[in-house]
């Protein structure tokens, strides 16, 4: 199943690349011929292209002239002719595809509790344990006589767990399982991986892998980040900064720009895209106000010699200012 999904995502990515080429140069016979050959490869290729093209049309194909945050008019047809043309156009299309294929409907079916953009929520579970949900987050709750389990489906959640003898409290997120009896800790899930940070008490973190399982213990002021490929790293964190999003603060120390954009995106009603991977991989340290995500985004971009283009209220692109 995972392989099928990965193949589908890969084909959609290739379809985006072809659509970018055709949109940038509709009279280019070589580009059109290459697309025809790619489409002739299989029905899966044709299906991927149709789905991406349909999303592009549903967006109204985006206006050729729009305004930036400074109020200046930006001619996207001219932008496409710059060195950043392919990256910017690809980011626009990728954002549209992300909107179309984002599994929000699936989350609604799976989740017992979920939040919308910029929405924070506090929940009390049946045993008295408290859960704080970050914006754009979702959990599923499964309680039985011998085990209390919460699955983090998306976003971030902070837990204050009531101790219960012989009834452990387990939070799962992908291949990571966090087991506690009574403590306060934060779990976050993103495209980069899963993070666990402890404000008080002790937790056990089990990382399940194809070759081996890794069990680690975290105590107050410790944080662990588990990458999607299973690699993990531990670090220290000020207990007061654990789940700082509950106070509308984003505190980061050496996080990638891509991770910061993901965090800000949960508090902004629109898609934020980074146009190139090298920019997304740059490291950021700072404190930002989640109540003003676009202001924070501009600040982050400036620190990395980047720029922010607000194409519409629904699409913002961060790109490098350097040629």
Image (cartoon, grey):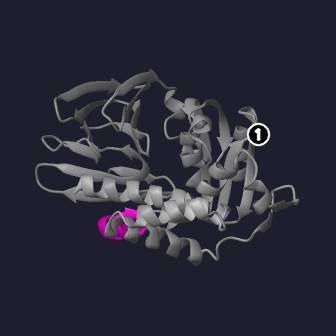
Q: Nearer the viewer, residue 109 or 31?
A: 31
Above or below, 32 against 207 in this view is below
The structure residue drawn at horizontal position 47% and vertical position 66%, both measured from the top left corner, is 36
Q: Nearer the viewer, residue 130 or 140?
A: 140
- Residue 18: percent from left, percent from top: 53, 60
Q: Secondary structure at mark 1?
A: loop
Residue named by callout 1:
321
Above or below, 273 against 63 in this view is above
Corner quadrant of residue 319: top right
Q: Is residue 116 visible?
A: no
The C terminus: image quadrant: top right
Q: Nearer the viewer, residue 276 or 184?
A: 276
Q: Residues within 10 Å of mark 1 (few under 14, many from 20)?
A: few
Left or right of 72 on screen, residue 202: left
Corner quadrant of residue 49: bottom left
Q: Nearer the viewer, residue 11 or 102?
A: 11
The structure residue drawn at horizontal position 19% and vertical position 56%, both measured from the top left corner, is 143
The N terminus: image quadrant: bottom left
The structure residue drawn at horizontal position 59% and vertical position 55%, both measured from the top left corner, is 90
Above or below, 21 against 280 in this view is below
Corner quadrant of residue 96: bottom right
Above or below, 243 against 292 in this view is above
The residue range painted magenta reads: 103-114
- Residue 67: percent from left, percent from top: 82, 63
- Residue 249: percent from left, percent from top: 62, 42
């Amino acid at each position: 199943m995972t392989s099928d999904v990965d193949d589908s995502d890969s084909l959609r990515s290739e379809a985006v690349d072809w659509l970018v080429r055709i949109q940038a140069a509709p009279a280019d016979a070589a580009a059109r011929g290459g697309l025809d050959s790619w489409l002739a490869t299989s029905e899966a290729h044709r299906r991927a292209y149709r789905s991406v093209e349909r999303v592009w049309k549903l967006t109204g194909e985006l206006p050729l002239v729009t305004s930036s945050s400074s109020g200046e008019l930006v001619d996207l047809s001219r932008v496409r002719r710059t060195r950043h043309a392919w990256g910017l156009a690809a980011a626009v299309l990728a954002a549209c595809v992300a909107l179309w294929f984002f599994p929000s409907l699936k989350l609604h079916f799976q989740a017992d509790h979920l939040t919308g953009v910029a929405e924070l929520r506090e929940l009390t579970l049946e045993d008295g344990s408290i859960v704080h949900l970050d914006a754009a987050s979702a959990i599923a709750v499964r309680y039985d006589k011998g085990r209390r389990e919460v699955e983090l489906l998306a976003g971030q959640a902070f837990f204050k767990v009531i101790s219960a003898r012989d009834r452990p409290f387990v939070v799962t997120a992908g291949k990571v399982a966090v087991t506690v009896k009574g403590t306060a800790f934060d779990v976050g899930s993103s495209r980069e991986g899963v993070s666990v940070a402890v404000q008080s008490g002790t937790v056990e973190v089990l990382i399940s892998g194809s070759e081996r399982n890794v069990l680690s213990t975290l105590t107050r002021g410790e944080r662990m980040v588990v990458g999607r490929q299973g690699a993990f790293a531990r670090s220290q964190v000020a207990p007061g900064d654990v789940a700082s999003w509950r106070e509308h603060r984003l505190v980061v120390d050496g996080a990638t720009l891509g991770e910061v954009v993901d965090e800000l995106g949960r508090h902004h009603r629109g898609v934020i895209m980074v146009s190139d991977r090298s920019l997304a991989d740059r490291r950021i340290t700072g404190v930002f106000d989640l109540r003003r995500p676009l202001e924070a985004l501009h600040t982050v971009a400036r620190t990395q010699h980047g720029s922010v283009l607000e194409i519409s209220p629904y699409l913002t692109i961060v790109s490098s200012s350097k040629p």
